[in-house]
Image: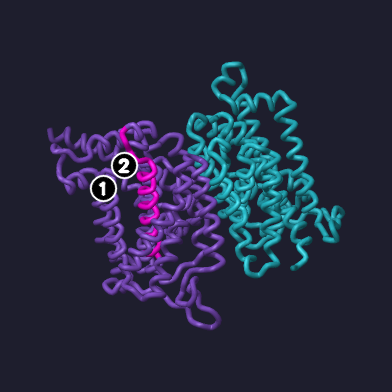
Chain colours: A purple, B cyan
Amino acid sequence: MTATHIQDVTQSGGPTQPGFVKRMWRDNAGTIITLGLLITIVPFLPVYWIRVFTSMMAVAAAAQGVAILHERIGHVSLAGIGMMAVGGWIGLRVAHGLGLPFEINLLVAAIGAGAIGALLGLPGIRHKGLIFALVTLMFAAGLHVVVSSVGFPDGGSGFWGRVSGSQERAFMARPAVAQSDHAYFIYTTLIVTLAFGLTYAILKSSAGRAWAMIRAGDAVAKSAGVNMKAARFKAFFLAGALSGIGGCLMAGSIGQLDGRSFDALQSLLLYGLVIVAGPWSLAAALIAAFLYRVFPALLDSWGVDGDIAMIIFGIALIHAIVNAPRGIAGQLQDLSALISSKFGGAAR
Amino acid sequence: MPDLTPFLVTGFALGAIYALAGLGIVVLYRATGELNFAFGALAAASAMVTWQAHEWGLHIWLACFVGIVTATLISAAYGALVSAKVAHRTDVIKAVATLGLALIILGLAYWIWGDSPRRLRLPLRALNTELFGVRVTGARVVAIGFCLVAAIGITALLTKTRMGLQMRALADTRDLSALIGIDVERVTLLAWVGSGVLAGVAGILLGTLVRLDPGVLTFMVVPSLAAAILGGLRSLWLTLLGGLAIGMLEAVATPFQTIAPYRSLAPFIVAIAVLMVLPAAAFRSERAS
């Protein structure tokens, strides 16, 4: 049982604990400041970068889902990007089929992807570790075949919602309040921030405490009276819903989605980056999404081949597993503690 | 009903390569408890290096040798440098570590070769043959033959040789094997070397059948994993049959217009079904059980 989990179990609520907002600030100050900085700075960047950061925020939601499954209930999901495709597909289908407001599409995508995530999690009730990881990998690979063949809804009729012949493909409408690229980035960041806040609240609720028990060991959780199936089901639903939100936000950003962007290797890469980032922290999702989406674009803009990013990720993943299990977030936290102690010492 | 014979024969050859890769994955998993997600990337490295060496003027067979040696050396380097450091971690963490190797190889391959269209051709026309009235290329004949030889060879290695005995002992309990004097690191290294050789051969054979693209070849690991799953990650012969069945299942869907676009789904559906039906204990590495 790691220190974080023990803290989760022992410091969740209680009369002597500070209020929820104070605790959220105390535990996630770095993440909150980063989100604030992003909302402040990114809208002033060129359109290309605004779109890259919007995509990063969408991926961050999916990364959060992957991190929760890994860190909270000890399951490896190799279908993070695949579940984004599910959310994107549902969001696009509902948007084109019913013409509902974007927020309703987002909610339906979250619930739909959450339900499929929970279904995908059914084998996770029987299998843990490698076997469940393989189930999710096979699911991601199969899903890629389907979305590559069928494509994403683009305003056509029928179940798949695909246009045929010379009919023009329709784009998903953005929310009324976020038509421009910079407004949509702010909108996306606020939605993802809200999702992170809800995730944090769940982690501090009875469900979060149940997950902490499961992570400590099945025997521990059972002896504490945790309903194992229900607790895992909730985690899979939450992870799926987060990916669904990410997929729908990405669909809203581009207006259409391409099946080729959702291959199984992308899901594997996202999982690897979550490990590099340090899945125990909420900040990990942001770091992983930054590495996944922004870092290769940065390399490109500096004239460095984007494929170098993959080499760096591979080295970082092996390094994280062998030497730095708390990942980048852990190293940043250690650095922050070191700086605090230096300044604290100087002040005294 | 269309005549399925040509598709079955074609699928048999593709399945043989899935099976060969599946064997490489299973033999390493049985010996070290490491599921090698980098198998496809090693295969890609072998095929790309073979193509490059041939482009530089090396005779094709010598180029193949260089390709296989490259995959083997990378695999051995991982086995020597990283494998021992993650030996006591869970199976899933060990598998994720190999994903790091896959990313490094794939990144390097794309950096060096990009995704321009290329073809790898082996001078195997003399082996072209006919099976049930269907023309079978030499490369496919070699794929089927090598797959069978590999299955027989690995079975013999594991059951008839001292090294195989040591591998099985290592698979049972790493620490006890070390206590009774088995050179654990050497045996682990040899398992990685063997897996590297199989990846090298599989990469070259697959490179003659599909587009020579690092990503396409790396992705081969997923249907090969499906074949290994059909073998319960343990049985060499079930993996062989699983790979062949997956290849043929994919191929026979080709003439049916409604399901043809989804034929690549076959390995994943079959693998998920097997994972859902069989008990978890059926997949544990011998060490874990």
Q: Position of residue B247 (x, y in %)?
A: 69, 54
Q: Residue at x 29, y 40 (%)?
A: A209
Query: Residue B13, image x and y in percent?
Result: 74, 53
Residue contact at pointers 2 and 1, CB within 8 angstroms: yes
* Quarter that holds the C terminus of chain B: top right
Closer-to-camera residue (A249/B285) = B285
Q: Is residue A170 above or below residue A195?
A: below
Q: Position of residue A222 (x, y in %)?
A: 36, 34
Label disc, if present, on residue A332 of the rendered structure: 2
Residue A30's disc is 1
Q: Which residues are magenta?
A: A224-250
Q: Secondary structure at mark 2?
A: helix
Where is the N terminus of chain B found, in terms of image quarters? bottom right
Q: Chain of mark 1?
A: A
Label the magenta part by its dominant secondary structure.
helix
Residue A46 image point, x, y percent? 34, 67
In which image quadrant can residue B75 be found? top right
Q: In the displayed structure, would residue A35 be above or below residue A323?
A: below
Q: Amino acid at mark 1?
A: Gly
* Image-based side of B277 in relation to A338, left or right: right
The three-letter amino acid code for the residue at tag 2 is Leu
